[in-house]
Image (cartoon, rainbow, N blue to C red):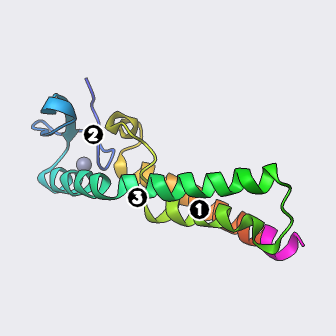
Amino acid sequence: MRTTCIYCGKPLGKKPQIVLVGKDRKEKLLCCSVQCYNDTKRFIEWDRRYRLISYIVIAVCVGMNLFVIGNEVDRWWKYIPTVIIGICLSVWPLVFTHYHTYERYGITRTLKYVRLAGYVIIAAGIIFTVFGQ
Ligand SMILES: [Zn+2]
C-alpha cells in the first residue's frame, strides 16, 4: 500500500483522497488532500489532452534525427530536431504512460525532473548548433 501522495509526494494523512484512473477506473491513485486530489485530476485531464500531440512531435523529431544521422547530413540545422524534442519535453513532460510511474517521486517532482532533462537537451542542441559548425 502506498503511503505517499501521488501528487506532492508527502506522506498520506489518515483520510487519503482517491482518484480512480485507467480502464474501468480500477487503478487507484492516493492523494494527501483535496487540493492534491483536484490537482491530480487536472493533471490527468491535461495529460489526456496533450500526450498524443507530444508523442507525435517527438516521433517526428526522432525520425528527423535518424534521417540526419543515417544520411550524414551536415547542415546547420541538424541539431534543431533535438532542440524541438527538448522544448516538447519541457512543455509537455508526459513521457510516462502509466500513472504509477509517478508514485516514486510524486507528479510534481517527476514533471520537474522531466522538464529539467528537456532543458538540458535544449541547451545541448543549441550549443551544438552554435559551436558545432
Ligand atoms: Zn499531496
Give the mark nearest the N terminus, 3 or 2: 2
Outermost residue, top side: 1
Q: Mark 3 points at which residue?
A: 53
Tags 3 and 2 touching, CB below 8 Å: no
Which residues make up the magenta segment? Answer: 128-133
Give the mark nearest the N terminus, 2 or 1: 2
Callout 2: 10 Å neighbours few (<14), some, many (20+)? Answer: some
Distance between mark 2 and mark 1 Cα atoms = 32 Å
Q: Mark 2 points at which residue?
A: 11
Q: Residue at x 63, y 52 (%)?
A: 62
On whether residue 19 falls in the magenta region, the answer is no
Of 53 and 39, the residue lying toward us: 53
Give the mark nearest the N terminus, 1 or 3: 3
- Asked whether, in this view, residue 106 is left or right of residue 21, the answer is right
Please identify the quadrant where the N terminus is shown: top left
Q: Is the magenta stretch mostly helix, strand or loop?
A: helix
Q: Whole-percent x and y of residue 74?
A: 86, 65
Q: Whole-percent x and y of residue 9?
A: 33, 44
- Asked whether, in this view, residue 80 is left or right of residue 91, the answer is right
The circle on residue 86 is 1
- Asked whether, in this view, residue 129 is left or right of residue 83, the answer is right
Distance between mark 3 and mark 2 Cα atoms = 34 Å
Callout 3: 10 Å neighbours few (<14), some, many (20+)? Answer: few
Please identify the quadrant where the C terminus is shown: bottom right
Front label number (2 vs 1): 1
Q: Whole-percent x and y of residue 127?
A: 78, 70
Which amino acid does the dot numbered 2 rest on? Answer: Pro
Which amino acid does the dot numbered 1 rest on? Answer: Gly
Q: Whole-percent x and y of residue 30?
A: 20, 37
